[in-house]
């Protein structure tokens, strides 16, 4: 159990940087996700922490110890790979014993630990099975058991759910999170799946083009995206062109379709700047649903799509379009295409960011 | 349900014909070795073990057989180690040098054996490093000819080898050497065994390169057979052939059990 510090971690490959100046402090016992599209540098960052990739510059500290120059086998780090990497020529018990034998533990101790760890991952009785006799989910549990049995200081998970089918993925998401909480082991989880990151993490670091662009709790990342990239990568958002009228106290007044609207102001925003207003479809209110103090503007319903739990509206605002999603509940008003409506949102739930 | 796509009748006929043509010499050698007559003729004049016994009791032929066996064994041992190391490097390196090296290592397969043998012989003689017509000199020739086969089979078994297996081992506390020995080597072992058996067969039957490098009075079996036939047209050479064929057939059966040859040749 240790904290992790990444100090200006950089990896360059000839032409460009795979990872640039990554600076992170991950708390002891924290579940931290590195979230980003493929090629953003999240896996390279993980592989540098594991010791498979040598950083071009920067340092890695675990529990205060500088491990930057140590080979993987001396880092005391557990890693679970995307494909689980179960040794195919060894059975489950031998796989789990691998790390313990290298640590020269007594035979009885090894046997006891194998039994305990298999019970922990719910695979008691699987000792003599081989990789080819295990399902994807079972292989993942074995991979976790094999790593956790050596009691590593930190746990690294490299897209561990991406090879599983959807149902199992949902189940494993909560199972891994529960196990991590129980063991209180510092964990870095690499994924391109926002659902996994939002559901499992204590904090998320969003990566794009070799850099960390935002670090925050799932709620901060989802509700207070700092850049347009984060906005577009996490969930769906309306992104519309606006003109900035005034900026004061972290709030901006912007012009959209002839109306002036208040919203939260992103970094570097100034009067007259070209900017984008960001607001999520589920935060857009229509007609009588609007409350006192909400930003309001006139719009026309372009289409209404019934999707069961929600109803989706395309709304014309000036020459731009905004998508709204309303819960399909009792007493919620429905609007036919062509209807002129007033739409709006709580200013605190919208963001104006530099274009 | 059949896994294999149906093969059309004309294709089958061609395949059977090719097989017959390939196997015919083997059948002829075996029958000629069991000849009861005085000379190497076909069809044989009756069957007997006369020439088989003559082979077994001939110091020249038995000596040559043993000599070839030891030579093939040592050459195989060296080729297997070198070829495995080379294949592991070649399949992991992405540098251009690796591609060039691979072509270079494979040269002895493409090059006529006579050319290789002559080149080595001229090299040994002109440099005067004591390898001309010596066992080490002959061994070097056999290693050169056999180790491309090990590279080929081991490379085939490295295709699709998942590097994260080795990384997982490293992360669990294994040194690079331990990870290689306990994980990689164990998983590519079938390819190594197949390569070793190929190397053995190739070395045992090697003639052209050997021609230039043999130690006087220590001829390997193919040379001994050739020399014997030049002076007396006796079926002893054919009897020796039976034993050579038996050894090669045995190794092929063993290798087929160790590794799916189909997988080796597909790569």
Image: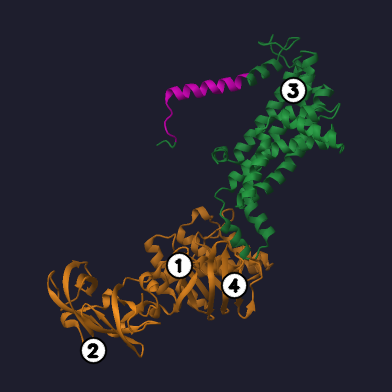
Chain colours: A orange, B green
Residue A147 visible? The answer is yes
| Residue B154 x/y as whole percent | 63, 44
| Residue at x-position 52% and y-position 20% | B17
Relative to the observer, which residue lies in front, B208 or A138? B208
Report which residue position mark 1 lands on: A191
| Structural crowding at the residue carrying mark 3, measured as other residues with C-alpha within 10 Å and reported as few (<14), some (14–19) or many (≥20) | many
The image shows residue B229, relative to residue A280, as above or below, that is above
Evaluate whether label 4 is on the same chain as label 1.
yes
| Residue B259 x/y as whole percent | 59, 41
Pointers 2 and 1 in contact (C-beta within 8 Å): no
Circle nearer the N terminus (4, 1) = 4
The span from disc 2 to disc 1 (Cα, nearest Å) is: 39 Å
Tell which subunit mark 4 falls on: A
Report which residue position mark 3 lands on: B240
The span from disc 4 to disc 2 (Cα, nearest Å) is: 52 Å
Name the disc covering residue A293, or none. Answer: 2
Name the disc covering residue B7, or none. Answer: none
């Amino acid at each position: 159990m240790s904290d992790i510090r990444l100090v200006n971690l950089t990896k360059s490959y000839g032409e460009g940087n795979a990872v640039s100046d990554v600076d992170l402090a991950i708390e002891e016992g924290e579940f931290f996700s590195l979230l980003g599209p493929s090629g953003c540098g999240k896996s390279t960052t993980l592989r540098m922490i594991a010791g498979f990739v040598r950083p071009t510059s920067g340092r890695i500290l675990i529990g205060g110890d500088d491990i930057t120059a140590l080979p993987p086998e001396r880092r005391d780090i557990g890693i679970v790979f995307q494909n689980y990497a179960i040794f195919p020529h060894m059975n489950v018990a031998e796989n789990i014993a691998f790390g313990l034998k290298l640590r020269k533990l007594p035979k009885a101790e090894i046997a006891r630990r194998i039994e305990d760890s298999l019970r922990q991952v719910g695979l008691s009785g699987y000792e003599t099975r081989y990789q080819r006799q295990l399902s994807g989910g079972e292989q993942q549990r074995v991979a976790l058991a094999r790593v956790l049995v050596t009691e590593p200081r930190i746990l690294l998970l490299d897209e561990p759910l991406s090879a599983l089918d959807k149902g199992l993925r949902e189940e494993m998401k909560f199972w891994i999170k529960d196990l991590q909480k129980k063991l209180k082991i510092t964990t870095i989880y690499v994924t391109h799946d926002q659902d996994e990151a939002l559901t499992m993490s204590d904090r998320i670091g969003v990566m794009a083009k070799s850099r960390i662009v935002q670090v925050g709790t799932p709620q901060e990342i989802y509700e207070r995206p700092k850049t347009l990239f984060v906005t577009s990568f996490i969930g769906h958002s309306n992104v519309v062109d606006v003109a900035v009228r005034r900026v004061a106290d972290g709030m901006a007044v912007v012009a959209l379709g002839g109306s002036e609207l208040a919203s939260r102001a992103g970094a570097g925003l100034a009067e007259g700047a070209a900017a984008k207003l960001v607001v999520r479809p589920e935060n857009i209110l229509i007609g009588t649903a609007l409350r006192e103090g909400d930003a309001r503007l006139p719009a026309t319903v372009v289409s209404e799509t019934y999707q069961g739990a929600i109803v989706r509206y395309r709304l014309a605002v000036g020459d731009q379009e905004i998508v709204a999603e309303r819960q399909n509940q009792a007493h919620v008003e429905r609007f036919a295409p062509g209807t002129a409506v007033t739409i709006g949102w709580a200013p605190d739930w919208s963001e104006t960011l530099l274009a | 349900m059949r896994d294999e796509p149906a093969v059309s009748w004309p294709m089958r006929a061609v395949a059977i014909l090719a097989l017959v043509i390939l196997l015919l010499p083997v059948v002829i050698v075996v029958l000629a070795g069991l000849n009861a007559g005085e000379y190497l003729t076909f069809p044989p004049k009756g069957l007997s073990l006369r020439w088989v016994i003559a082979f077994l009791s001939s110091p020249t032929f038995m000596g040559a057989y043993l000599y070839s066996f030891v030579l093939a064994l040592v050459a195989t041992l060296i080729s297997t180690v070198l070829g495995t190391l080379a294949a592991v490097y070649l399949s992991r390196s992405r540098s251009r040098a690796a591609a060039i090296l691979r072509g270079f290592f494979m040269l002895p397969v493409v090059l006529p054996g006579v050319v290789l043998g002559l080149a080595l012989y001229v090299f040994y003689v002109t440099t005067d490093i004591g390898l001309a017509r010596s066992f080490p000199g002959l061994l070097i020739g056999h290693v050169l000819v056999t180790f491309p086969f090990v590279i080929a089979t081991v490379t085939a078994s490295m295709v699709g080898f998942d590097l994260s297996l080795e990384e997982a081992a490293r992360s669990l506390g294994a040194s690079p050497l331990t990870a290689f020995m306990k994980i990689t080597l164990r998983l590519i072992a079938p390819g190594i065994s197949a390569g070793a058996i190929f190397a053995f067969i190739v070395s045992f039957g090697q003639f052209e390169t050997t021609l230039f490098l043999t130690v006087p009075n220590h001829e390997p079996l193919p040379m001994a057979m050739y020399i014997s036939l030049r002076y007396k047209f006796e079926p002893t050479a054919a009897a020796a052939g039976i034993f050579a064929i038996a050894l090669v057939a045995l190794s092929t059966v063993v290798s087929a059990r160790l590794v799916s040859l189909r997988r080796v040749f597909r790569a």
